[in-house]
């Protein structure tokens, strides 16, 4: 079986900001870890192109909606590439394969008796492109976009019998506690479910830009109902030659905490109605905040991930986002903290360890990895770190996984201070001890580099090459993090700084 992981697809009304990038980087780290663990991984990302916001953005640019979406696909792909994100497929909701899946899904749901036509009215947020529960609305403002005025809309639309699946969903949550993670998201949704479900509108009569309802060509499918189906249209379903049977059910949907109701309540009910299996796990991560506010372009608070990657380095940015806060909780962004992580953890920590370890090898042993004897001074640390790392990463504790890998670096730097190789080099009787220390330092770098590869793929590949490890990144596995693989007699050369020290952004 393939490990199938997805992210939410993104509106293309504007460029991606750092909050959007956070989710994609996290999913890429998870995908890379599972590849490191020897699994066959399929990683899906994409763009959500049917929405009023997209149509409005295209009009403002004097383009058709499709022309705008084509331009924005290139923009999004460029940003993701600048962040070292490697996906296996990129789905667009304007693609024929997606439209086919939406049509088939709606036909199945209708055939099951779960679609009917009726008037629908309620508070609608054009920013969220969603109707809001009246109990969540305060002073006619959107609870997810503070200060944004809501519109009261009334339309004759097709509806999905979501209320029919209330007991099914309650049983799902009670009997499968891992279905939604972290626990705080699951508990929030359970409380919402216990308040009762109402049927939802799944079409818009006032919109033109969207997938036509297969049994009513005068209406288009509501953007959220359309968008959720990307997770199976990305497998090629319902085409006969699709990878659906190999990929579905998805192992993991990675989404933001603000869209859990769509993914964890509506999506499972849709799949159940259509007779399809449910995904195995949905993880609702926290926000990237600027101060106390969620990062968003509409709110005037955002940061450009490509600009940050160009200044600090893509891998330094990735590392900071994953280690600064536990995955699932909000992260308070600040370039001051990013600078500390880049210079302290990476330049002074891992980068300096590699540089001085290789430099001492070149100075004291002509760059040749020595034969060693006796017990290693770091093997137990590396073994324990690898065990902790594997457990944490498997449980989506990304921060703790990164910390476990970095514990090897911390211990190796302590070893330099304790053993003082420059002093050992002055005493011929301590030659074997010097060999032992040098070898252990180099192995600490190599093993830490393997474990950190999902977080910093470009820099960790450079680290491996500096130690004459000739495997491509895709060829590395967790077994490569076992102590003792660096062969005696290997010739190393001095290395350029892996993480040069970085200055603050000029406007900070």
Image: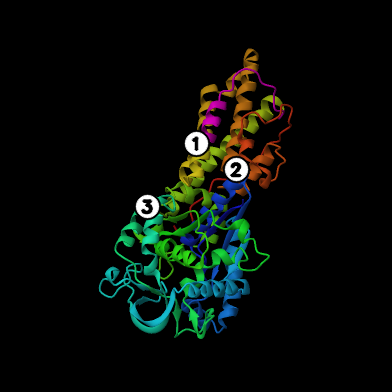
Q: Which of marks 3 and 2 is nearer the N terminus?
A: 2
Split into 4 quadrants, where in the image is the C terminus?
bottom left
**Circle on res. 174:** 3
Segment tinted magenta in the rendering: 367-387
Tell me which numbered mark, 1 or 2, is placed earlier along the sequence.
2
The quarter holding residue 173 reads bottom left
Residue 301 lies in quadrant: bottom left
Work out whether residue 58 or residue 100 is closer to the camera in this orientation and state it. Answer: 100
Categorize mark 2 by other alpha carbons within 10 Å: few (<14), some (14-19), many (20+): some
Residue topped by disc 1: 388
Q: Describe the element under mark 2 as helix, strand or loop.
A: loop
Where disc 3 sits, the SS reads helix
Quick one: label 1, few (<14), some, or many (20+) residues within 10 Å? some
Of all residues, the one furthest to the top in this rendering is: 429
Q: Which of marks 3 and 2 is in front?
A: 3
x, y percent for residue 463 = 64, 41
Q: Which of marks 1 and 2 is in front?
A: 2
Out of 200 and 349, give the one closest to the viewer.
200
Label 3 – label 2 distance at C-alpha: 30 Å
Residue 100, position in %: x, y? Answer: 60, 74
Q: In this view, does 246 lie above or below 360?
A: below
Residue at 71%, 34% (x, y): give it: 492
Q: Which residue is drawn at 48% across and 76% down?
A: 51
Helix, strand or loop at label 1? It is helix
Residue 291 seen anywhere in this rendered image of the structure? no
Observer-side mark, 3 or 1, equals 3
Residue under pointer 2: 37
Seen from this angle, which residue lies furthest bottom?
A: 218
**N-term-proximal mark, 3 vs 1:** 3
Tell me, for residue 471, which label it has, or none. none
Q: Does 377 lie within the magenta span?
A: yes
């Amino acid at each position: 079986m393939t490990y199938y992981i997805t992210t939410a697809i993104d509106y293309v009304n504007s460029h991606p900001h750092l909050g959007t990038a956070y989710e994609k980087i996290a999913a890429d780290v998870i995908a890379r870890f599972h590849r490191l663990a020897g699994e066959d991984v399929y990683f899906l990302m994409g763009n959500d192109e049917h929405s009023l916001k997209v149509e409005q953005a295209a009009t403002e640019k004097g383009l058709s909606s499709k022309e705008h979406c084509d331009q924005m696909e290139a923009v999004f792909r460029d940003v993701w590439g600048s962040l070292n994100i490697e996906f296996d497929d990129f789905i667009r909701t304007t693609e024929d394969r997606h439209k086919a899946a939406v049509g088939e899904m709606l036909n199945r749901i209708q055939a099951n008796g779960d679609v009917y036509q009726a008037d629908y009215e309620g508070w609608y947020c054009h920013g969220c492109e969603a109707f809001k529960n009246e109990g969540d609305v305060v002073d006619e403002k959107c609870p997810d976009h503070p200060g944004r005025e809501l519109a009261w809309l009334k339309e004759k639309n097709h509806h999905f019998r979501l209320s029919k699946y209330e007991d099914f969903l309650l049983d799902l949550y009670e009997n499968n506690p891992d279905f939604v993670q972290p626990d705080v998201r699951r508990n929030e949704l359970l409380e919402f479910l216990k308040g009762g479900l109402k049927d939802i509108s799944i079409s818009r009569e006032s919109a033109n830009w969207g997938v036509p309802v297969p049994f009513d060509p005068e209406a288009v499918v509501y953007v959220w109902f359309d968008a959720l189906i990307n997770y199976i249209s990305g497998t090629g379903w319902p085409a006969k030659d699709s990878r659906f049977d190999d990929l579905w059910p998805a192992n993991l949907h990675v989404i933001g905490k603000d869209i859990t109701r769509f993914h964890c309540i509506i999506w499972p009910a849709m799949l159940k109605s259509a007779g399809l299996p449910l995904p195995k796990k949905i993880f609702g991560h926290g926000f990237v905040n600027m101060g106390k506010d969620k990062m968003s372009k509409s709110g005037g608070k955002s940061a450009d991930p490509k600009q940050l990657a160009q200044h600090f380095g893509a891998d330094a940015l990735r590392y900071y986002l994953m280690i600064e806060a536990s995955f699932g909780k909000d992260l308070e962004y600040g370039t001051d903290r990013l600078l500390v992580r880049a210079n302290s953890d990476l330049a002074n920590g891992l980068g300096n360890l590699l540089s001085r370890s290789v430099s001492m090898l070149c100075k004291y042993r002509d760059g040749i990895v020595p034969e060693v004897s006796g017990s290693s001074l770091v093997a137990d640390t590396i073994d324990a770190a690898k065990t902790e790392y594997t457990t944490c990463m498997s449980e989506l504790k990304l921060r703790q996984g990164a910390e476990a890998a970095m514990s090897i670096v911390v211990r190796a730097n302590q070893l330099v201070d304790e053993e003082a190789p420059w002093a050992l080099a002055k005493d011929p009787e301590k030659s074997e001890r010097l060999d032992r220390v040098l070898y252990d330092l180099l192995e600490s770098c190599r093993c830490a580099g393997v474990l950190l590869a999902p977080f910093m793929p470009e820099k960790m590949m450079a680290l491996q090459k500096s130690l004459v490890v000739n495997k491509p990144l895709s060829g590395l596995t967790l077994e490569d993090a076992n102590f003792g693989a660096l062969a005696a007699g290997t010739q190393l050369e001095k290395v350029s700084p892996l993480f040069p020290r970085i200055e603050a952004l000029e406007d900070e």
